[in-house]
Image: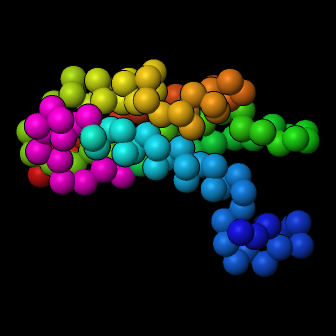
Amino acid sequence: MDSPAESRGEIQGPSPMELVTLALGGCTGMDVVDILLKRRVSLKNLEVTINYQRQQEHPRIFSEIEIEYTVKGNGIKEEDVALAVNLSKDKYCSVSKMLEKTARITHKWKIVNQ
């Protein structure tokens, strides 16, 4: 881990808060993949992008988090992706459930049929 340059860091690694976003992306991404595969969706790839805003004052916790899923595969249906994302959000992803106590989390996705 490291800190940004303005905090005397050398940017040699992710900050602690960036690691939290990695945990969120990994947690929900693994859920979505698992649910889609159980539904026999022909999934080739899933990319998860996390965008966020933090409070200006200390402690600079997350205030807004947007999770964007790019789902790639064959014949992927909107309802399958919606179900997988909602199950992750509402039931399975413990990182998301913790963060939603202090941040507004939104979800969106795009499907790329290949």
Considering only vertical position in the picture, is 22 above or below 95? below
State yes or no: residue 38 in magenta.
yes
User: Going by the image, does 17 lie left or right of 4?
Assistant: left
The answer to whether one can see residue 110 in this image is no
Who is closer to the viewer here, 65 or 87? 87
Considering only vertical position in the picture, is 54 above or below 63? below
Percent across and percent down for residue 8 are 89, 73
Measuring 43% from the left and 29% from the top, which residue is drawn there?
A: 92
Measuring 83% from the left and 42% from the top, which residue is drawn there?
A: 60
User: Going by the image, does 112 lie left or right of 67?
Assistant: left
The answer to whether one can see residue 72 in this image is yes
State yes or no: residue 22 in magenta.
no
Res 57 → quadrant: top right
Who is closer to the viewer here, 43 or 52? 43
**Quarter containing the N terminus:** bottom right
Percent across and percent down for residue 41 are 13, 39
Res 4 → quadrant: bottom right
Percent across and percent down for residue 46 are 30, 50
Measuring 88% from the left and 66% from the top, which residue is drawn there?
A: 7
Res 78 → quadrant: top left
Q: How is the image coloured?
A: rainbow
Percent across and percent down for residue 50 are 53, 46
The magenta stretch is 35-47
Measuring 36% from the left and 30% from the top, which residue is drawn there?
A: 85
User: Going by the image, does 49 lie left or right of 76?
Assistant: right
User: Going by the image, does 77 lie left or right of 96?
Assistant: left
